[in-house]
Image: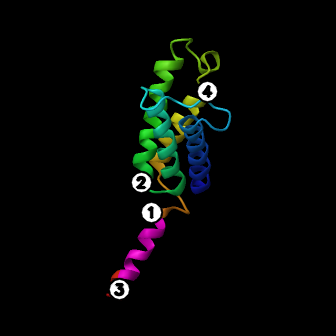
Amino acid sequence: MIGIFRIVVGFLFATHGAAALFGVLGSKQADLFAWPSWWASAIQCVGGALVMIGAGTRYAALLCSGSMAYAYFTVHQADALLPVQNGGEKAALFCFAFLLIAVLGNGAWSVQRTASRREPAAAAAE
């Protein structure tokens, strides 16, 4: 179940970032290298993809979690205290979902797990 959760959250985050990076899926394209919109979109796209496939998952998830915490406190918190009031529900949910993934790790069906299974077989063949 952890693997499925990681794949779904990573996919949703990556598509959110890709939409802003490339101006697709009904989103406005972020200006190249504009702070923080372009950089946040790049973290979302790349970090979400890494989490989704399970490569460098803990580090990518921690970076994604931090970026959503930053987004919540700099963009949403200024408008109101609670996420339901300031529109920060997605940022808060992504922040804690990625924090959970960073703590729990890959789960099943990850690139890292597949690679670690092949190493002993390759060493035995030599």
Q: Looking at the image, which is closer to me, 22 or 77? A: 22
Q: Looking at the image, which is closer to me, 67 or 106? A: 67
Q: Which residue is mark 2?
A: 56
Q: Amino acid at mark 1?
A: Gln
Please state the horizontal and vertical placement of residue 109, each as a whole percent of the image. 55, 63
Q: Which residue is mark 3?
A: 124
Secondary element at tag 2: loop
Task: Please tell me how crowded label 2 is: few (under 14), some (14-19), or many (20+) other residues with Cα within 10 Å.
Answer: some
Q: Amino acid at mark 4?
A: Glu
Q: Amino acid at mark 3?
A: Ala
Count the marks: 4
Task: Please tell me how crowded label 4 is: few (under 14), some (14-19), or many (20+) other residues with Cα within 10 Å.
Answer: some
Chain-order first, disc 4 or disc 1:
4
Q: Which residue is mark 4?
A: 89
Please state the horizontal and vertical placement of residue 66, each as a whole percent of the image. 43, 34
The N terminus lies in which quarter of the figure? Answer: bottom right
> Is the C-beta separation of discs 4 and 3 under 8 Å?
no
The C terminus lies in which quarter of the figure? Answer: bottom left
- Mark pair 4, 1: CA separation: 31 Å
Q: Which residue is mark 1?
A: 112
Q: Amino acid at mark 2?
A: Gly
Secondary element at tag 4: helix
Res. 3 image quadrant: bottom right
Type of colouring: rainbow
Chain-order first, disc 1 or disc 3:
1
Chain-order first, disc 2 or disc 3:
2
Q: Magenta stretch?
A: 112-122
Task: Please tell me how crowded label 1 is: few (under 14), some (14-19), or many (20+) other residues with Cα within 10 Å.
Answer: some
Instruction: Decide whether the magenta segment is chiefly helix, strand or loop.
Output: helix
Q: Nearer the viewer, mark 2 or mark 3?
A: 2
